[in-house]
Amino acid sequence: MTSAPVLDVRSLDTVLHTPDGRSLHVLHGVGLTIAAGECLGVVGESGSGKSVLARTVLGVESRTTRAVATGEVRLNGEDLLAATPARRAALLGTGIAMVHQDPMTSLNPVVRIAEQVTESITNRRRLSRRERLRTAAELLAAVDVPDPARRARAHPHELSGGLRQRAAIALAVCCGPELLIADEPTTALDALVRGRILDLFTALRAERGIALLVVTHDLAVARRIGGTVAVMRAGRVVELGPAERLLETPEHAFTAALVAAEPGARR
C-alpha cells in the first residue's frame, strides 16, 4: 500500500514579475510527489527553474521580484497556494523547513549557534538560557556535531564549513518538519564533508520519516542520495524516475546529455 504524499505538486506554473515591468514564465506545469521518508532530487542546468521551484513550495520570494504561482502545492493534502500568509508562516519550521546553500549566509555571524538553532523553538515557547544551551547541544548532537555543548556557545566563524552546515541542518529540523528542502546544500563543501552531509540527510529520512527535496546541479549528489530524480529544463520536468535507472539509462535526450557531461563519464 502506497502512503499518501507529504508533498504533492500538480500543474505548477510560476511567473516572476520584475521591477522593470517584465514577466518571466519560469515554471511550466510542474508535477511531482514525495512521501514520508522518501527523497526527490531535482537536477538541471543553471536557470532551469530548480531554485524557483523550491522557493515556490516554501512560499518565499526574492526581494526584487514578485512571484505568481498557479496550480496546486499540497502539504499533507493542504493546498499551500490557497493558504493565507499567516498560515504559511505558521507552517515554516513545523511543516516545511529549508537548508540553504551557504551556511555563512543563512547563519547570523554575530549570534551564537545556540541562539540560532533554537530560535524556532523559542518563537513558540519560552526557554531559559540554560534550557536553550541544553536544547541546542541536543540538536547539534543529533546531527553528529562533536563536542556539541562547546559548539553551541560558538559563533559561526569559529566552526568549519561542515560543522556550520550541520548547525544549519539542526536549525532546520529543530521543530520536526515533515518536508525538508535542501537547495544546493553541499556546494561549498569538499568531497569528504559533502559525503558526510548527504549521509546525514539519509539518516534523517530513515530516523524521522522526513520527506526530502534536494535541489542540485551535481549528478553525483543525486546518485548519492538515491530515491527519485526529476530532471528540469527550461522550467519543465522532462524526465522523472528512480535515480539508479534514470542516471544509468536515461530516456530523454537532455538527461542523456547531462549524464554524458558529468566529470568522469565514459565518452
Image (cartoon, grey):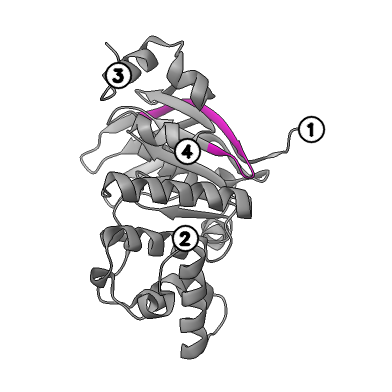
Which residues lie in the magenta part? 26-39
Kind of residue indicated by mark 2? Ala
Label located before the other in sequence (4 or 1)? 1
Residue 265: image tag: 3
Task: Pick whichever, 14 or 44, lies toward us.
Answer: 44
Q: Which residue is the site of mark 1?
A: 1
Q: Which residue is the site of mark 4?
A: 225
In the rendered image, residue 234 lying in the magenta stretch gets the answer no
Placement of the N terminus among the 4 image quadrants: top right
Label located before the other in sequence (2 or 3)? 2
CA–CA distance in space, label 2 to label 3? 35 Å
SS of the residue under disc 1 = loop
Closer to the camera: disc 2 or disc 3? 3
Is 68 left or right of 179, judged from the image as shown? left
Q: Is residue 187 visible?
A: no
Task: Pick whichever, 30 or 67, lies toward us.
Answer: 30
Label located before the other in sequence (3 or 4)? 4
CA–CA distance in space, label 3 to label 4? 19 Å
- Residue located at (40% from left, 25% from top): 232
Task: Pick whichever, 85 or 203, lies toward us.
Answer: 203
Density class for disc 2 (Cα within 10 Å; few <14, some 14-19, many ≥20) is: many
SS of the residue under disc 4 = helix
Label located before the other in sequence (4 or 2)? 2
SS of the residue under disc 3 = loop
Label located before the other in sequence (1 or 2)? 1
Residue 262: image tag: none
**CB under 8 Å between callouts 2 and 3?**
no
Closer to the camera: disc 4 or disc 1? 4
Kind of residue indicated by mark 3? Ala
